[in-house]
Amino acid sequence: MKNSSGISRRPFLFCSLMALLFLSISFSVNAQTITGVWRGKIKGQQAEVKIVKSGDELVGVAYYYQKKNKYKRYSLRGHFDPNTNSVIWWDEMLLDDYGTGGIMQLRPDAGAQMMVADFNCPGGEEMYLDGTSSSRDKQNSKNGEVHLQKMSKPIFNDEWDFIIDNYFVGGNDPILIDSVSQITAKVNFPEEKNMKPVMVIVAPGKSNPPPAVSAPEPGAANPTPAPVEATAAPAPVASAPIDVVEKKFTTRKNVLQTVIPITAKTIELRFYDNAQVDGDSIALFLNGRLLFKNIRLTEEAYTIKINAADLQADNELVMVAENLGSIPPNTSFMVAIVGDKRYEARLFANEQSSAMIRLVNPELLKE
């Protein structure tokens, strides 16, 4: 095919397509370079962290060690924003405690950390993660710095090595990654239903005014959805006095179960009963203030919206179990919508601990 001047367009089109393909591949590779072995120090302690990007989520493992045969090992989860190069990850579950074996469940852990860092590539093949660490289960508690460099080989060999070594030749298969990262029983997600938010809130600002709650629109769903028939008879939901609910909040340990980056003007949170509806009832606290109580979890979403402008750099949303339902512990499946991002988490609470979600602004935390 020729243009009016008689010059063939095919070589030009071919070169253009190849250039676009090259740019696409280059972008894909650059977006994935967070995957790998990172070594250095976290909170002054020697650390080796293996990070794997799976969709919008980070998974992997972290070693805190004195020497090769003396270490703590945690599973990790996190998020990476390629637009800002911000990385957030946290120690999820203790897998090995200096050779004694970990307790394979989420539980309070004073030694567990949450990290917020910048992904830096100063030149050549050098890559760094630099930022701060804080106590995982306690907000506004910066306790150290993060300085990690990407390495070609690990000190500690484990099941993640195959994924990292073969990441660009099939190792990035989400099913394969999920098979390695899933160390607890997999639970099916409840099916979401299109519903209007049952409550809309404005989060308390730094001056901590009471949260403003708007009444549901006429014809909207009832704030407390009707119970859904279950195989086991659900326990009755008593209207606990506020002081009883607040006592449960103050006396139970908070356990971090997910972190949501604040990257949009509003955060929408949807709460469901996880798996089988069994009469679970919860209360929600934001930065120490009671937002809602007597929330009956069902297969339909209980939804709240929070204005990001009224949040701090680091915020704690805590789910307190008012009861344990007929099948303990109290479990919830939460979906968070932040701009065009969607985050999912299973939340667990009982009579000893409450589920904590940290809503963090990584740009502000790095200041």
Image (tube, rainbow, N blue to C red):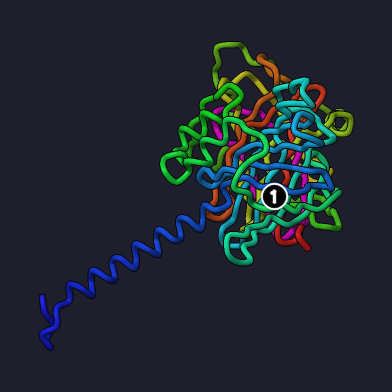
Magenta stretch? Answer: 294-318
Q: Amino acid at mark 1?
A: Ile
Q: Residues within 10 Å of mark 1 (few under 14, many from 20)?
A: some
Q: Residue 286's x, y, as percent?
A: 78, 44
Q: Residue 321's x, y, as percent?
A: 75, 27
Taking the magenta stretch, the answer to whether it contains residue 317 is yes
Residue 198 visible in this rendered orientation of the protein: no
Q: Which residue is mark 1?
A: 201
Q: Residue 324's x, y, as percent?
A: 72, 20
Residue lying at 41% horizontally and 43% vertically, measured from the top left? 169
Residue lying at 59% horizontally and 11% vertically, measured from the top left? 232
Q: Residue 132's x, y, as percent?
A: 78, 53
Residue that extends furthest to the bottom in the rendered view of this protein: 5
Is 263 left or right of 360, judged from the image as shown? left
Vertical relation: 13 (above or below) 193: below
Residue 250 visible in this rendered orientation of the protein: yes
Q: Describe the element under mark 1 as helix, strand or loop.
A: strand
Q: Quadrant of the C terminus?
A: bottom right
Is 22 left or right of 251, judged from the image as shown? left
